[in-house]
Image (spheres, rainbow, N blue to C red):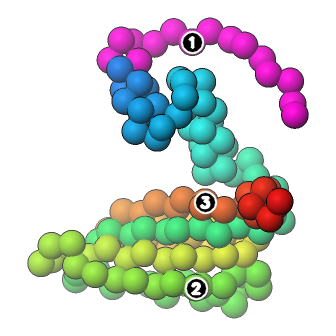
Amino acid sequence: MSEIVRFGVSMDKELVNLLDGLTELHHHPNRSETIRAMVRQQVLEEGSENPEASVTAVISLIFHYSTTLVRVPLDAYPSLKLTTNLQMHLERDIVIKILVVSGTYGHVRQWAGKVIGQKHVVGRINIAATDSLYEQLRT
C-alpha cells in the first residue's frame, strides 16, 4: 500500500455540509474516504489515466429531438467497441442517449470528445471501469 499523507483542507461551512451529505449518501466511513473517491474519479475524467489502459465508459448525451447527431465513425479508433446504445425521451422534445463503450483510454476519450462536442448537445463521459479495477475485481 502507498504511504498515506495527512493534510488540512479549509472550506466554507456550506461545502463541508455538502461533503458530509455525500459521505452519508455513499456510505463512506469518513470525509477522507469521500474526498479520496472524488479525487480518483476526477483524475480519471481529466485524462491522467494511461492512454493504453483498457476502460469502459458511459457517455450520456442530452439534446432537443430535432437535433441531428453527426455520426462519428468508430473505424479511426481500432480498440473501440460500442456495446450499448439506448435512446429515450426525457420530455416530449428532449432526448437522452446513453452509450456504453470500451477500448483504450485514449481512443475512448478522443471518440467521446467528438460525440459530446457536437453543436446543441450536452454530454458527459464517465469512466466506469479501468484495468486496475478489473484486476481488483478478479482477486
Mark 2 to mark 3 CA distance (whole Å): 14 Å
Disc on res. 127 = 3
In the depicted structure, whether residue 25 falls above or below residue 69: above
Write down the region rendered in magenta: 1-16
| Mark 2, residue position | 83
In this image, 58 relative to 24: left or right?
right
Name the residue rendered at 80%, 65% in the picture: 138
| Mark 1, residue position | 9
Q: In which quadrant of the rendered view does residue 95 lie?
A: bottom left
Instruction: Give neighbour class at mark 1: few <14, some 14-19, many 20+ (Cα, 10 Å).
Output: few
Residue 114 spot, x, y in % from top left: 55, 71
In this image, 55 relative to 138: left or right?
left
Mark 1 to mark 3 CA distance (whole Å): 27 Å
Decide which of tag 1 and tag 3 comes sooner along the chain.
1
Q: Secondary structure at mark 3?
A: strand
Tell me, yes or no, if residue 3 can be seen here. Answer: yes
Near-viewer residue (56 or 117): 56
Residue 10 in magenta? yes
Q: Secondary structure at mark 1?
A: loop
